[in-house]
Amino acid sequence: MRARPLAALLLLGATGCTRTVYESHFATPAQLVKIAEAGTRAPFLKCHMPDGRVFVLEHWSIDEGVGTAQGWGLEYAASRARVGRARQITLGLRDIALLETDRPYSVDVGAGSIVGMAIGSAASIALTVVCAMNPGACF
């Protein structure tokens, strides 16, 4: 009998979860204005190169005057195999084909589940009351 309250508690806890969703913004180096606003909230910058390589930079910045993007990050080959270890990386904006920022935000996925569980529980309780009052109608 102790398993039921525990199962109910676990079910209730699972319905109150959130998940992280990423909103992506893409721009060519010539469209830096487009990436600048999104970049204020983006924890990392992906620099896609013409040959298929990708550099993923954290703690990044873009210096338009010098024409560079720099940050601490990793390099990935065109096959997406990681190349080397994390390091300080500086890339020329002219060498980059596409810039990508991904802004994370949390989405509450529990509200719909709780509403569904409440509707199902109310229907079950109503049916139980009807059956208790008139057993011949249910059995």
Image (tube, helix red, strand yellow):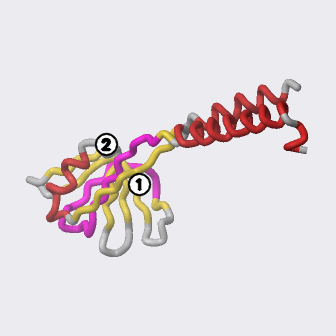
Q: In this view, does 3 lie above or below 138?
A: above
Per the picture, the main secondary structure of the magenta-coloured stretch is strand
- Residue type for callout 2: His
Q: Which residue lies furthest to the left in this view?
A: 65
Tag shown at residue 48: none
- The boundaries of the magenta stretch are 84-107
Number of callouts in the render? 2
Between the residue at mark 1 and the residue at mark 2, the CA separation in whole angstroms equals: 12 Å
Q: In which quarter of the image is the C terminus?
A: top right
> According to the image, label 1 marks what residue?
74
Question: Between residues 133 and 91, which one lies in front from this camera angle?
Answer: 133
Closer to the camera, 12 or 122? 122
**Residue 116, image x, y percentages:** 60, 42
Say if the magenta span includes residue 114.
no
Q: In which quarter of the image is residue 134?
A: top right
Task: Give amino acid for label 1.
Answer: Leu
